[in-house]
Amino acid sequence: MPKKINVRAILQGKLQGMSNNDIASAYHCSKHSVTDVVIIATEKEILPLGPIPNLSEEELYQLFFPDRNTQEAVFEPVDYEYVHKELNRVGVTLSRLWVEYKADIPPR
């Protein structure tokens, strides 16, 4: 999993007058990441004079990069009640349930 950009550190570095290269070096991130954050902050009018929003790290990251790290459910949720009921039957194993489950899935 890729490392998240430390938006707050980049903003603090810019407010302290650091260059993009210095910020990238100090906070171990790419120059492109620093540039992206600075551009977004300027568009959202957070920089150059605005204060850093008082948000958690996750909320701040989502403010800057709303499309990143969104997860969608790829699989249907497991019906554990059904699985446990079936496993209580004689001769039923988890492997057998898995084989039956795979047989019920339509091909792509």
Image (cartoon, grey):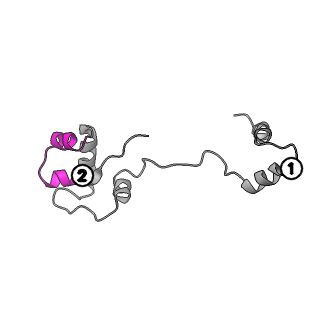
The amino acid type, in three-letter code, at marker 2 is Ala
Q: Position of residue 92 (x, y in %)?
A: 84, 44
Does the magenta portion include 21?
yes
Residue at x 37% of width, y 42% of height: 3
In the image, which residues are magenta? 11-28
> Quick check: 91 left or right of 6?
right
Q: Which mark is residue 89?
A: 1
Q: Residue furthest bottom?
A: 54
Q: Which mark is residue 58?
A: none
Position of residue 90 relative to residue 45, above or below, is above
User: Which is the main secondary structure of the residues drawn in magenta?
Assistant: helix
Residue at x 28% of width, y 44% of height: 36
The amino acid type, in three-letter code, at marker 1 is Arg
Tell which of 95 and 22 is nearer to you.
95
> Which residue corresponds to mark 2?
9
Q: Quadrant of residue 55 in the image?
A: bottom left
Position of residue 88 relative to residue 105, above or below, is below
Residue at x 69% of width, y 34% of height: 108
